[in-house]
Amino acid sequence: MLPAMDPSNLLQQIVRPWYDALQDPMKAQEKTLLDLLEYYRRTDYGLKNSSENIVSIKDFQACFPKLTYVQLQPYLKEVREGNYRSMLPEPPIHWVMTRGSTGTSKILPATKTHLEQIFSCGARALANYVLRKKDIALITGKILNLNFPSVVSTLEVEGKEVSFGYSSGTYARLNPMLNQVSLLPRQEEIDKMGPGITRADWERRFELVYSKALGENVTAAMGVTPVILSFAKYVKRKHGKRPKELWNFKALFCTSVRKIQFKYAPKLKSYYGEIPVVEMYTATEGVFGQQLDDLPYITPNFDKYLFEVETRDGTKMLHELKRGEWGRVIVSSCLFPRYDIGDMIEAMGKNYFRIFGRATAWTVLEHGLYRLLYGWFL
């Protein structure tokens, strides 16, 4: 029989590529570009725009135009009709949807490689936290499952009806580490309660989570930040106690909204206790970064995704931004090249960044005024 692996060694394997990339982001991004080009050259779209002469970021930018979700639609239609190589280097094995927090929900394909990156990068925040705090107790306990349902409706793919649901629930259900070992309740139990997301639907889910978790060794919650906060408010209103009075939380791993540290963290701590709120920069399209240390910022996964930023001074690589520079994020992944994700990011120096809003005219105006009034302080 082989000896059991030391948990710290396994955790190191999860975070090591991230740590290494942060030592030399430029080199990491150059390698990531070469890796991504191998994917793109296996697609009709990539072959049309690519050439063997692409050897630099500037070549890549010149050959591949920026893409929005609307511009992706003709290619995704071809994917659904059976020609996955229209845009993807491998066939989709699932379809997932966004929450639609800023408009209509987007429906996107998920490939094997994409899911592998979601799971590996998604584990980095937790693994990094355990290694930093030297507290293995966090991963020996249960993690509250407050995710959206993974089965909502059906989509016609190659003439067949294929079910799809919210990405957060789908990724939780498919994640072999979390769903089989740690999540409470399991995603299948969440899905059985139906696809609705009205207040009544959420309260039924919250009651299931509460009843399943009561008396269990719950050490963390992970998921969409407003849902984590709403659960705490529900438990206090319905059962008269705050979550910190019922469970021994070590940390909260919060995703999917902007200004987590500044807008949500104080409220979360009032319900869950004076524990770390660990920010993760995630979307349906990928897990792009996570909090490295106690500073309230994220650091990118330079080894998996290519990051550009549209600034007032032109398009720059994310790692090139100086402290205080900001703009609109463009991400290249194993799914899509140069995808406009619709977020605004600001450099805080030394590979620290903060996501401060969606890319709207109001956000740009608000942040411009903020920089004008307080930029000297930064």
Image (cartoon, rainbow, N blue to C red):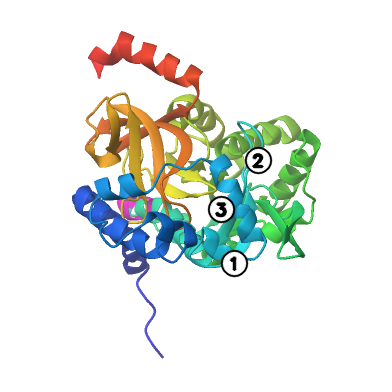
Tag 1 near tag 2, CB within 8 Å? no
Q: Secondary structure at mark 2?
A: loop
Q: Nearer the viewer, mark 3 or mark 2?
A: 2
Relative vertical location of residue 226 with respect to residue 246 in this rendering, above or below? above
Q: Secondary structure at mark 3?
A: strand
Q: CA distance from mark 3 to mark 1?
A: 11 Å
Q: Is residue 169 visible?
A: no
Task: Say left or right for 116 vs 321.
Answer: right
- Per the rendered image, the range of residues in magenta is 129-133
Q: Is residue 131 magenta?
A: yes
Residue bearing the label numbered 2: 105
Residue, x 69% and y 52% (percent of image)?
A: 165
Tag 3: amino acid? Ile
* Numbered tag placed on residue 265 in the rendering: none
Earlier residue among tags 3 and 1: 3
Tag 2: amino acid? Ser
Q: Nearer the viewer, mark 3 or mark 1?
A: 1
Relative vertical location of residue 10 with respect to residue 341 in this rendering, above or below? below
x and y percent of residue 352 in the render?
29, 37
x and y percent of residue 149 in the render?
70, 50
10 Å crowding of disc 3: few (<14), some (14-19), many (20+): many
